[in-house]
Amino acid sequence: MSSTNSTSNAAAPVGAFRMPRLSRFSAVIGLVVMLAAAACAWLATPRLQAISGAPSLDATVPKAFGDWRVVADTTTQVDVAQGVETVQEQPYDQTVMRTYANSHGDMIMLALAWGERQRQDVKVHRPEVCYPAQGFAVRQLGDGHAIATDARAQPVPTTQLLAEGRGGGFESVRYWIRIGNMYGGDGLQARWYILQEGFKGRIPDGVLVRASQRLARADAAGDSQALMESFLKDMVAAVPAGSRSLLVR
């Protein structure tokens, strides 16, 4: 009796765990799920660039057009890449920072920043983020008048803001951001657009076109915005037609 019980206990110990057997159907379903995940990952990986061999922004945008001429200016513009710590985080491949003046003595600062590859974590920086990061307080922010150009059928939507410096004085800003063929929108919309382009196998380029003017009084912002609208319209018109897609599309 005792010998029989001992043999029985050794063969089937109490609490023993048995691996469940997977049916052929379950194995097939698991394989299909893994293949589908791999296919989605492959489709979501962009393999094309939006623009290859883009022209030089510095050479493309004229230093003189209409009543405007580039002038020497010691004023430091707000950095377009504030907060970038490494080369991998740098969203721009080309930048242009200039100051133009007209025959009436008006001065406008122009900042252009173009990046060949816009990604979820590295994309064009919005001025309403860069200005506060560099000591300005944003006092006004909203949609500006869309700027009509010959480069596209629809006017270019713009954003305008008024920022106040720490030491007094104001800066009136007019800008647009283009990512691929998309204008406007917030950071979430930009991420969604970039994701959609990725599924299509495309990496969109992006550009910030920003005009700004230093002001002594906040109530001068209205006239400043009108002047910058005219400036930007003339600037786009002066860019050779074959290169305008860097700025507007």
Image (cartoon, helix red, strand yellow):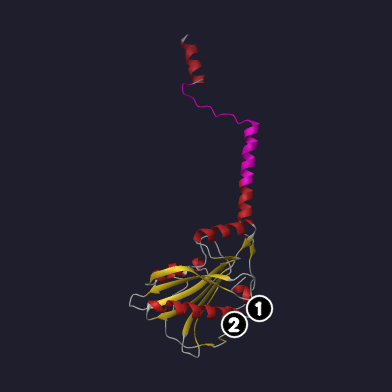
- For the residue carrying disc 1, how many other residues have a C-alpha within 10 Å: few (<14), some (14-19), or many (20+)? few
Q: Distance of mark 1 from mark 2, alpha carbons?
A: 14 Å
Q: Which residues are magenta?
A: 13-36
Name which residue lies at 57% across and 71% down: 156
Name which residue lies at 54% across and 78% down: 232
Q: Which mark is residue 59?
A: 2
The kind of residue tagged 2 is Ala
> Does residue 104 belong to the magenta stretch?
no
Q: Closer to the camera, 212 or 45?
A: 212
**Is 44 drawn above or below residue 232 in the view shown?**
above
Q: Which residue is mark 1?
A: 241
Helix, strand or loop status at disc 2: helix
Helix, strand or loop status at disc 1: helix
Would you say 186 lies left or right of 55 here? left
> Does residue 15 belong to the magenta stretch?
yes
Name which residue lies at 53% across and 27% down: 18
| Percent of width and height locating residue 126 | 48, 68
Lower sequence index among marks 1 and 2: 2
| Percent of width and height locating residue 222 | 45, 77
